[in-house]
Image (cartoon, helix red, strand yellow):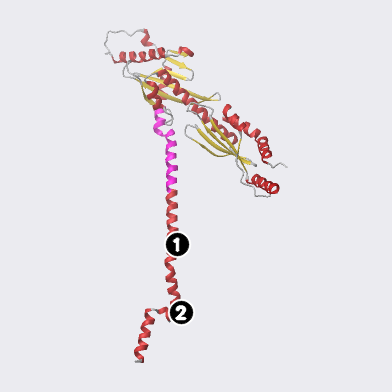
Amino acid sequence: MDSDIEESLKKRQRKTPFLGDPSSRKQFEQFAARPYVMGEVNFMQEEDIRLEATRARFSNVLKRHGELTERLSRDSDKMIFDRLQKEFEAARASQTEEICLDGEEWNDGLLATIRERVHMEADRKAMPVDSNIVSGPHFQERITYKVGSKVICCLEGTRIGIQYETSFAGEPCELYHCVLESKSFLEKMTVLEHTIPFFLPIREAENDLLSSNAMKFIDYIGELLQAYVDRREQVRLIKELYGNQIKELYHSLPYHMVEFVLDDSDCKVTVSLRYADLVSVLPTRIRVLAWPSKKSSMNAAAMNRKENGVMGSHQNPSRLSYAEDALRTMSLPEAYAEIVLNLPRALQQIFQQRSPTL
């Protein structure tokens, strides 16, 4: 009987070993706690996976943005530019006359004459070689027209080429090309090819203007390109002149939205510029805010506590009206110099207005 009881106790100890063995009890407790540790590890792994997914998405966005901007200088775009540039140079080299037009001399009638000339030249070249028709002197003329910063010439076939010359501060910048074509003199012209940046709305302008007023379309594209170059070069110049002061500069591809931060010892100035349209060279929606630095905010809070016996609140930004006026009427580099020159006095006035009066 006693042996049966002893054997039963041994079996129980084997089934629940921690009841008799302290080390086994410790192992069991560790095993019992293991699910919680694993749960924490799983949570951390899930967090890492989410972070990696976020990094991957952000990297993909940056990659796509880089590819988009790279399209401006792709090999295919360069090939088109080089080919058209050579064709324009050949057309100007073979010209018999270059006519400079001013004001009302550039009109729809002249453009119609140019269109008629290219179609007559194309028809003449399509005639049989043994034709008895003798070419008149007007067929021998190769005239190039210069209208402001535009050069208009007749290209091979029924094509009219427009070369746009851009500049900034009197210095020449890029050349752009636009080639127009029509199947006949009576049909509307279309844009055959161009070297205009892809983010400028040439197709929208073609749909809106070219069929109804070709001259207005040609002029508008010139304004569009020159305004883009103006805005871009203004941003480039402030980066070149004041790059050590400017932080966090952002802009859209056509430079019609520009934002940057000016770091000052007493404050941080944020500048936000929006242009009414893509032919504007001065912004129309401007916001310049001065954010007190941490040091100046703490000083203001200490003064409030001393005077009012309460904790000072976070300082709100102040709008710099003088800076907004400067940006509205001056080029960006000129306005920036004006802002920096008058910033200490403007900040002093702001701090005086915010200081508690006795």
Give the residue number, with chain letter if any, for mark 1: 40
Q: Main secondary structure of the magenta part?
A: helix
Could you say which quadrant of the image residue 71 lies in? Answer: top left
The reply to whether the magenta stretch includes residue 76 is: yes
Q: Is residue 155 magenta?
A: no
Residue 22's disc number? 2
Foreground residue, 263 or 32? 32
Task: Where is residue 5? Give x, y as percent.
Answer: 36, 88
x then y, percent, for residue 355: 68, 41
Front residue of 107 and 39: 39
CB of mark 1 within 8 Å of CB of mark 2? no
The mark tally for this picture is 2
The amino acid pointed to by label 1 is: Glu
Quadrant assignment, res 109: top left
Secondary structure state at the residue bearing disc 2: helix
Say if 119 sits above or below 67 in the image.
above
Q: Position of residue 82 (x, y in %)?
A: 41, 27
Q: Position of residue 157 (x, y in %)?
A: 34, 19
State the extent of the magenta-drawn residues as a range.
Answer: 56-81
Disc 1 on helix, strand or loop?
helix
